[in-house]
Amino acid sequence: MTASVKISLPNGLNYDQPTGLFIDNKFIAGNGEKFTVYNPATEEEIITLQGASEADIDKAVAAARRAFEGEWSELETKDRGALIYKLAELIERDRKLLASIDSFDNGKSFADAYGLDLLESYNVFRYYAGTADKIMGKTIETGPTKLAYVLQEPLGVCGQIIPWNYPFMMLAWKIAPALACGNTVVLKPAEQTPLSALYFGNLVAEAGFPPGVVNIVPGLGGVAGKALASHMDVDKIAFTGSTATGKAIMKSAASNLKNITLECGGKSPCIIFDDADLDQAVKWSHGGIMDNMGQVCTSTSRICVQDTIYDKFLEKFTQRTKELASKIGDPFHEDTYQGPQVSKAQFDRVLGYIEEGKKSGARLLHGGAKHGDKGYFIQPTIFADTTEDMKIVKEEIFGPVVAISKFSTEAEAIAKANDTSYGLAAAVFTQRVARAHKVARKLQAGMVFINSSGDSHFGIPFGGYKSSGIGRELGQYALDAYTQSKAVHINLGTEL
Ligand code: ADP
């Protein structure tokens, strides 16, 4: 049993933070590289952890394999569902603490962590708890005396690698469907935000899961993540993060031809036609890029506005940005809209893009610099009159930086929107239903928001076209990602 450390959170909550790896329902010491977790609002160190080494990953995978071949696979699906339901209840019980932990090491506002991330997380566990005993294949008559039926079987040991922008929610999206389908899991949280995932180990043990069904292995991406993605006894790898890392993981996963689900980056367009409700378009397109400090893979970071309303839109969008820029600050303050970027590396990266934007000739309408002297805060930044060749239009920035340009015709808007290697999401603002549907059909994106932005729901598939990923998460679609079908052919004929 490794130590835990007492942590006092800025909102007065105190708790015991486990510091090891969670394997076989126990916390054990890691043997890999040390890494430090920071509070991005103050730049202060929270804790230094010792991550998983390659040998630790072997240990976790072996535990998951034993569990998969043992008690877990013998459990009736209704009992599997009951355990997942119990986890949902424990997450709801500890909602305030888990939200506080995510706010502490990620920097997102506590209000968002509590109101969005944690609410979604226990809803996802509940949804899949109800799914566990409803996974089924089809029966097909293949001839007058022949029959085939299909079993939807679990894949086995699933490696799951998650990012730092929604620390607990990404864990929920990954673990809940994998368990519902009867798999076992080895999950690696991001090194910037591993605390809530480690705490979750307590809840897995408390819920009564057999040892080895869920294992949590914090560590460095290039060590623990790589070892998991390339492991010969892991059957699936599910990943959310940048496209560059997604490509590296896909290569590692080729070692034993693992099943993969990749949810990668985006540079999502937002088209605003002149028949849109302008105030609504301003509100949603602003949230579409500025919510969660722009650290959302579906962020609508390229706004394309019809020329007839371009100036009016810029004026209103800048006004709204100014208003909400007054709510930058302490993530635990109840009025805060914008916290810091997650880390020094992200802070520097985003400021680098802002400098690039200034040099490119785009018109800077708001922001353009860091905010304050302490913490990784960045002013919400608006660039107008951008063109498709600019780096700030082509590349994912993952910060509160938007590129706005104009178009004149519907065809031009669609061409601009699709002029990207990414294809995660897209938004369309218009009051004409026929136009909304026509444009939605033409957009090369896995998700389209009409008169909205950033929507997701645990029952609806989430994932991207083109370089934004492979496969879908959530809803019944995730069952395809976590099962494989076995066809059983039966000969019922009696003649020889
Ligand atoms: P960022 O660059 O913003 O940290 P990444 O996409 O690189 O985002 O990270 C997302 C997750 O992928 C993290 O958990 C990280 O540790 C992990 N990761 C990074 N590099 C690798 C790698 N080569 N193999 C496996 N996992 C990795």
Image (cartoon, rainbow, N blue to C red):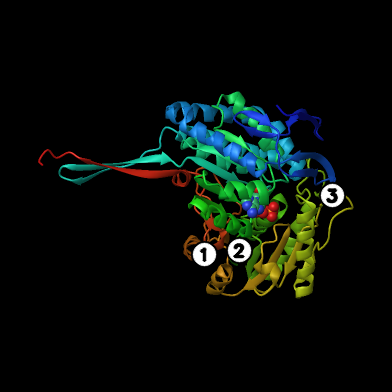
Q: Is residue 19 left or right of residue 216?
A: right
Instruction: Give residue 4's quadrant in the image.
Output: top right
Q: Amino acid at mark 1?
A: Leu
Q: Is mark 1 within 8 Å of ligand 1?
A: no
Q: Are marks 3 and 2 in contact (CB under 8 Å)?
A: no
The residue that label 3 is drawn on is: 375
Secondary structure under tag 3 reads loop
Secondary structure under tag 1 reads loop
Q: Is mark 3 within 8 Å of ligand 1?
A: no
Instruction: Give residue 418's quadrant in the image.
Output: bottom right
Mark 1, Cα crowd under 10 Å, few <14 / some 14-19 / many 20+, is many
Number of on-image labels = 3
- Please report whichever mark, 3 or 2, sits nearer to the chain's N-terminal start: 2
Q: CA distance from mark 3 to mark 2?
A: 30 Å
Q: Amino acid at mark 2?
A: Pro
Secondary structure under tag 2 reads strand
Residue 165 place in picture, x, y as percent: 68, 48
The residue that label 1 is drawn on is: 443
- Please report whichever mark, 3 or 1, sits nearer to the chain's N-terminal start: 3
Instruction: Give residue 268's quadrant in the image.
Output: bottom right
Q: Amino acid at mark 3?
A: Gly
Q: Are marks 1 and 2 in contact (CB under 8 Å)?
A: yes
Frontmost residue, 100 versus 333: 100
Mark 3, Cα crowd under 10 Å, few <14 / some 14-19 / many 20+, is many
Residue 269: which numbered mark, if any? 2
